[in-house]
């Protein structure tokens, strides 16, 4: 991984030199934009609107428009705006994890200590783990100030960039129904939620959309027609709400019973299989031992009083005591 920011984390008087690495990645397919007529790729150029000529990246600057013209900003101007926040993730307070609304979270970044920051990094990590707290911090990256939370994930410090208050839109303009819900319907819905409740396992969820899209791309490339299963999501009418909740509960119960029966059947089959396997092993072992004894009776060489007697099938009486 390539670090995207170098600086330090500070809490109190402790400063930890660190690097930031992106903790997530975009899984979208890389699709090109083409001209419909000949499938030639569409190219975007940085063009001077006065001359119409293309401008190289090295000759492009950023500017803020004012009435009298543009104020040009250089790289150092962005750092000068707040030198500390451009170089430091400054933890200003600690809060409980439950206090943060999920809607605030935007993007995670893994934090790695630089050489001289190992012990202080471990100190902050272990203290956060023990208290269950998150550090609230602000810093500047890519010419923008970010509000963030510092916590622990899989024994590594992770920084979550979150949204400022003014970045969250007010939902008051949404048209929410004022229809009253019956207590029985709520109880039924709670029962359904409880039946579907399980321990969260992140590995269980896979991004399959890209794979499905790739199948369509492959089938189109070979001239095959991919059959698409149509899906129509119909809203449940208010009058059918109770019936649908009951049906959902029943469906879940049946599925649970079926899973239990399958598990029991598989366990039983496994027991029978192991029993048969053990019986077969014992039978095979007895056969092998019997064969070995038989071979021994036929070919054992016995020395009696210094004389060698080669045992044959007639030597059976001498070997009755052998296993």
Image (spheres, rainbow, N blue to C red):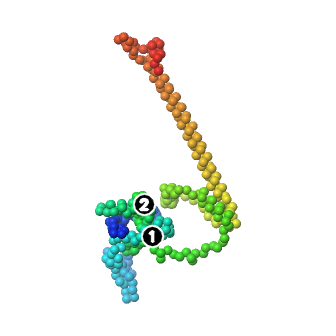
Residue 130: mark: 2
Q: Earlier in the sequence, mark 1 or mark 2?
A: 2
Q: Identify the residue shown where x is 63% and y is 73%.
A: 177
The residues tagged by marks 1 and 2 sit, at their Cα atoms, a distance apart of 23 Å
Image quadrant occupied by the N terminus: bottom left
| Residue 19, percent from left and from top | 34, 65
Q: Is residue 153 left or right of residue 181?
A: left
| Residue 2, percent from left and from top | 35, 63
Near-viewer residue (312 or 214): 312
Q: Identify the residue shown where x is 53% and y is 76%.
A: 170
Near-viewer residue (138 or 247): 138
Near-viewer residue (222 or 96): 96
In the rendered image of this protein, does residue 64 appear above or below residue 251?
below
Q: Is residue 179 visible?
A: yes
Disc 1 designates what residue?
Answer: 162
| Residue 98, percent from left and from top | 49, 66
Q: Identify the residue shown where x is 47% and y is 13%.
A: 317
| Residue 183, percent from left and from top | 67, 65
**Given this view, does label 1 or label 2 mark the residue nearer the observer?**
2
> Around disc 1, counting alpha carbons within 10 Å, would you say few (fewer than 14), some (14 to 19), or many (20 or more)?
many
């Amino acid at each position: 991984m390539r670090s995207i920011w170098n600086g330090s984390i500070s809490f109190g008087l402790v400063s930890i030199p660190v690097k930031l690495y992106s903790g997530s990645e975009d899984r979208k397919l890389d699709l090109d934009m083409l001209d419909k007529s000949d499938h030639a790729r569409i190219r975007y150029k940085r063009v001077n609107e006065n001359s119409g000529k293309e401008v190289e990246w090295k000759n492009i600057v950023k500017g803020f428009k004012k009435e009298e013209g543009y104020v040009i900003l250089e790289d150092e101007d962005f750092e000068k705006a707040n030198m500390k926040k451009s170089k430091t993730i400054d933890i200003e307070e600690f809060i409980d994890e439950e206090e943060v609304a999920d809607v605030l979270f935007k993007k995670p970044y893994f934090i790695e200590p630089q050489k001289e920051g190992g012990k202080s990094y471990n100190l902050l990590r272990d203290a956060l783990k023990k208290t269950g707290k998150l550090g609230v911090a602000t810093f500047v990256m890519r010419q923008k100030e970010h509000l963030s939370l510092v916590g622990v994930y899989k024994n590594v410090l992770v920084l979550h960039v979150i949204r400022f208050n003014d970045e969250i839109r007010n939902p008051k303009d949404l048209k929410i129904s004022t229809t009253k819900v019956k207590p029985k319907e709520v109880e039924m819905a709670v029962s359904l939620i409880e039946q579907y409740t399980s321990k969260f396992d992140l590995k269980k969820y896979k991004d399959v959309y890209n794979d499905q899209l790739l199948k369509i791309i492959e089938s189109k490339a070979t001239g095959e027609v991919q059959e698409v299963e149509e899906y129509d999501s119909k809203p449940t009418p208010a009058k059918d709400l109770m019936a649908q909740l009951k049906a959902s509960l029943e469906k879940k119960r049946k599925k649970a019973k079926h899973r239990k029966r399958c598990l029991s059947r598989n366990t039983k089959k496994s027991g029978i299989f192991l029993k048969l396997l053990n019986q077969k092993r014992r039978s095979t072992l007895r056969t092998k031992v019997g064969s070995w004894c038989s071979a021994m009776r036929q070919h054992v060489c016995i020395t009696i009083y210094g004389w060698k007697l080669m045992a044959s099938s007639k030597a059976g009486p001498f070997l009755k005591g052998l296993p």
